Amino acid sequence: MIISKDLFLLGDQDYLRLPKDDKRPRKIERLDNGVANPQEPPGCMHPLPAHRPIELTFTNLTVTLDDKRQVLRNISGVVKPGQVLAVMGPSGCGKTTLLNCLSGRTKLDSGCIHLNRERLNKRCKRRICYVLQQDVFFPDLTLRQTLEYAALLRLPDSLSRSQKMQYVDHIIDVLDLNNCQDTIIGDYMKRGLSGGEKKRANIACELLTNPALMLLDEPTTGLDSHSAYKLMMSLKKYAEKEGKTIVVTVHQPSSQIFHMFDKLLLICNGQTAYFGDINKVVNFFSGIGMTIAPHYNPADFILEQVKGTEEMKQKIIAAAKRAQDDYYHQELLNLNCTCDKYLNNYRHNHNNSNDNYNCQSWPINAANGHICTAFSDSSTDSNEKCYTAITVNEDEVRTLWLDSQSHSSTSTSDEDFTWQWPTSFWTQFKVLSQRNFQEARPQMLSTLNWVQTIALGLLAGLLWFQLPRTEQSLHNIQGWMFFSTTYWMLFAHFGTLSSFPPEREVINKERQSGAYRLSAYYLAKMVGELPLTITLPAVYHLISYPMLGMHSFSTFFTLLLFLLLNTIVAQSVGFFVGAFCMDMQVSITISALYTLATQLFGGYLATNIPSWLQWMQYLSMVHYAYQNMQIVEFSDGELIKCDPVKSRYTVCDNSTSGVIPASDIVNAQGASFPLWLNTVILFGFLIVFRLLGYLVLRFIRKPK
């Protein structure tokens, strides 16, 4: 909506148009009547400004999948603010595909989608909320925590924390979630919210941004009749009270729910079987000889008809096409935005054989004052730009035609607009770090993991208890080092591997809704989970190393740092593999091969490595951590004494001191580097795999 050449509406705020190199938004807060107001009334129940109501129009949508199967063919419809459109049809008819199209997630073969008079573009998508059929949440967070984090991320920084929490309270009250707000979400292993409560929680997360258009995919699936009715009643009241536009796909609703809807779009074989008012669908089927029995659910009846024989389906589709044309003529809405068809219809209706029509001679209904603003691109005859009908006076035709041309250049190009995230990078990073920490803590620091860590630390300490610093005990000391590095490598790697796939679904959903930057999430995940990642290895080291025979605090802390560094590197590798491999079995297989190879070439299990395989040592993260632990342990304190009978080290034969230098011990196990270089290589592993994980999420596994 263009107010002036320097002002355009963006989402829930108004911004002045800026030069491309000027990133500063100049915000003007507005009242509901559209008048600029420099101050918002304090204590408002709805801290977000009201969106402009949206009229959704979709025209001749056609979609073909990769297997060349046409899922949708020439689907059209219109939904006005305050109305609820039900999309019904048999399983596999294309209901979810239609919602994906309306949300901009599926590419169209042909057709156009408009919100008011603006063609669907990147900016428009920010005003749409899409509630998926699957309820995707972090299971260990409570309902209130989930909504609070969503509010902190998706509501603008101009609102204080108390205002955001006030809005959370309002949404909880609207959707009647007060009694379960402190219950965890839960999953198949942990009992939490019921099915109906999860559905309402899913909707609540999307309502936080005060969207103008809501798309809901099968919100009543899996609910009992009472829960489904209660949910749909909440949505109906919300649409009427707030002036929202709602599109819902339903499979087979009860009669009570069916009569709540304002409009119905019935799909059969990917085509329109009926579109119109919900209270006229029975008359439509009666008009083609399909009469409903008394006291019969209309939803059940119409689904039975569209599941009938192929002849019956074609009869319904043909009747729907005739009724659809009549409906559009009566409502004076052009849902087929092609110049040729409009002109041909106009010629036919007025018995005019004049061929000198052009796309700027539009048919005008003087009584109702409607005009179709479809036009052909003068530069490319094959390209068409589509706009829905608008109501004008006859004297205003030329003015609005020029305005439509100006508006088309604005709405179809995103180059002039810089999307402003709802919150700053720092806010996103801070909130996501807190959420990652709170969500991962129950799993990473579970009671089972604590028991396992303490028991393993005691067992390792008892097994290698107070080993003497002699050559005979050298292999046992090295055994403790190698065991510690490999165990915590596997623990961190496979722990990340198993926890990331469920989290990926939540992240994809939030990224699709534009909640935060991927870079903010990625950095917050590394920082937020870092304390949890290092806690258990530190406790293990604190228990086992003193029992081994600690001789200095500096050695204790240095060994701990290298153990933790190796653990964090292993976590990075697990995150990369988990992000890259969609199949869990494939990721486990790849991880098993890599971690086993890392152990084999670590320098402890095999020392006589063939020359043609020695390069594999340089790819083993354990190799560098294990080397550093040996250098630190054997260079400080009491040195290792040579075997007086038969030593494996030549230095013992020529030395009078009778001790083995740390360099000889390390060199005996293959290629070795100095301490600083091993540390640099470990940090290189860390940076490379973290960066690869980000690139995979950014370019390969981005949500569609």
Image (spheres, rainbow, N blue to C red):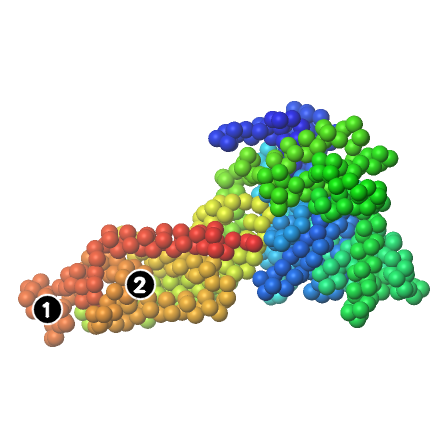
Which residue is found at the position 48% from the left and 51% from the top?
Answer: 698
Q: In the image shown, does 157 or 236 lie closer to the viewer?
A: 236
Q: Residues within 10 Å of mark 2 (few under 14, many from 20)?
A: many
Question: Do the residues under discs 2 and 1 have CB atoms within 8 angstroms?
Answer: no
The mark closer to the camera, 2 or 1, is 2
The dot on residue 144 is: none
Location of mark 2 (residue): 620
Compared across the picture, whether 509 is left or right of 463 comes to right
Depicted 85 relative to depicted 394: above or below: below
Asked whether residue 189 appears in the rendered view, the answer is: yes
Residue sticking out furthest to the bottom: 645
Residue 123: x and y, percent?
61, 40
Location of mark 1 (residue): 650
Mark before the other along the chain sequence, 2 or 1: 2
Which residue type carries mark 2? Ser
Q: In the image shown, does 639 or 575 lie closer to the viewer?
A: 575
Q: Quadrant of the C terminus?
A: bottom right
Helix, strand or loop under label 1: loop
Compared across the picture, whether 148 is left or right of 519 comes to right
Depicted 438 relative to depicted 93: above or below: above
Residue sticking out furthest to the right: 294
Residue 92: x and y, percent?
69, 65
Which residue is found at the position 32% from the left and 52% from the top?
Answer: 683
Which residue is found at the position 7% from the left and 69% from the top?
Answer: 653
Residue 227: x and y, percent?
77, 58
Compared across the picture, whether 643 is left or right of 489 comes to left
Which residue type carries mark 1? Thr
Quarter of the figure with residue 475:
bottom left
